[in-house]
Image (spheres, rainbow, N blue to C red):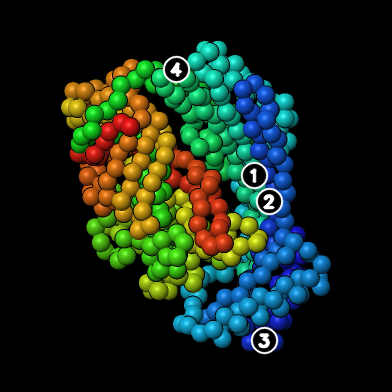
Amino acid sequence: MREITEIAINILKEECKKENVDYGDVRVVSEEQEEIVYKNGKVENILNTLEAGIGIRVMYKGFWGFASTNDFSVDNIYKTIKKAITIAKISFNVGGSGFSLTEEEVYVDEYITKILIDPFTVPMDKKIEIMEKVDKILRSDNRIKLVHQTMSFIKIDKYFASTEGAFIHQIVYQSGGGYTAYAFSDEDMQFRSYPASHGGNMLTGGFEIILEQNWEDNAHLVKDEVLKLLYAKKIEMGEYDIIIGTHQMALQIHESVGHALELDRVLGFEASYAGTSWADKIGIKFGSEYMNIVQDGTIERGLGTFGYDDDGVKAKKEFLIKEGILVNYLSSRDSAGFINKKSTGASRASSYRRMPIVRMTNVNLLPGDKDLEELIFDIKDGFYLETNKSWSIDQRRLNFQFSTEIAYKIRNGKLIKDEVYKNPVYYGISPQFWNSLDGVANEKYWKLWGVPNCGKGEPGQTARVGHGSSPCRFRKVKLFSI
């Protein structure tokens, strides 16, 4: 792949000079993936895929052209470069204001995810054995009719080179998975997931991610809680003080903060498909003083962690919201100039076949200074909500509704884990909701989660991003059970 990248960038430099093209870059990407699906004591599917190709991007007088191919012959690389240049010139002739790229440091470097166990060398039998043990525990009660488990392992080998002189090699490993148990009674169906819903939790790292999650040990708790949910109470509609657990916080951050702060949405570039954003001005009060949000492409194990983005910008950690005030956006080299800032290193493409666009890295809520028991102690009549079940939010990322798998009662300053409530739903308006935040638990409770299926763009792209948070307390939130 290095040799292919060198050939491609040399041809691209020559053609850019000939055709008066301002800028060009090459991405050569190989992505290997293994996914295991295990259902009710049987392997339902083992999927092994390998995709490789080259994406060529050029800018002519402020207008992009892009083309890609999975044919690595020199002749085809040349044709793909010519196609990208042709598209850029056609775009220029259509008219408009075009883009300019921010000036950024140029790197020649290598980045490789730190792993302890290469997931692709672990025998399949060992992976399935973990799933067999979980299945046996969960289906030992005949009310649990379905147990669905997945494991996923990904290796991305990528070269990036630009006409500015960048030449970067990266290898990123991503690993994770989880399971969901579905229980049935004559009147109801409930489910409970571990370590998270929607396929579990995924992080950068090797097979050690799976081992550290302790699937077997936690299956007993999942079994106990899903059976309790079958006969649990419902929450009467009202306004309650609530604490939101870390996994649900990850989804809350993702939908109402992360997407709202993608600069291309704010500028209107995503308006026809993914929407815009209500948070359209730096300096606005997004939330309370307890709200400190950073984008961090450097944090160890984050699913949105890497060495360099697909503009060749080094991964970085920067505040987006500081003490409730919006101070920056997620941006790329072609968007950051609109707000007179440098790129935050958030330009990524889902594959060699797609153009990079603004994507989340790891958008994290920084921990506060309170112990979780302190947050609970100050609630007389409320609930602790955990594990996302569903979400809905409008195109401006303003009005939202979320449901979680479970709610625990908080009464007179005590969390009563044995008193569970089913089908909890809370809703609100983003700035009012975030301004009701009045406490964030400290770093002891802070946890990192991966979102492996974030959709955006037209044509569509699926990105893997991350979010970290501690449990948070919000006051007078509208809450009920369906």
Q: Earlier in the sequence, mark 4 or mark 3?
A: 3
User: Mark 4 sits on what residue?
Assistant: 185
User: Mark 3 sits on what residue?
Assistant: 19
CA–CA distance in space, label 4 to label 1: 38 Å
Question: Mark 4 or mark 2: which is in front?
Answer: 4
Question: Mark 4 or mark 3: which is in front?
Answer: 4
CA–CA distance in space, label 1 to label 2: 7 Å
Name the residue type under label 2: Glu
Q: Which of marks 4 and 1 is nearer the N terminus?
A: 1
Residue at x 27% of width, y 24% of height = 409
User: Mark 1 sits on what residue?
Assistant: 154
**Mark 2, residues whose alpha carbon is within 10 Å: few (<14), some, or many (≥20)?**
some
**Mark 4, residues whose alpha carbon is within 10 Å: few (<14), some, or many (≥20)?**
few
Q: Is 236 placed left or right of 187 in the picture? A: left
Viewer-proximal residue among 239 and 362: 239
Residue at x 41% of width, y 68% of height = 268
In this view, the residue farthest toward the front is 186
User: Mark 2 sits on what residue?
Assistant: 31
Q: Which element carries disc 4, helix, strand or loop?
A: loop
Q: Which element carries disc 1, helix, strand or loop?
A: strand
Q: Earlier in the sequence, mark 3 or mark 1?
A: 3
Name the residue type under label 4: Ser
- Displayed quadrant of residue 437: top left
Rendered location of residue 406, percent (x, y)? 37, 28
CA–CA distance in space, label 4 to label 2: 43 Å
Name the residue type under label 3: Glu
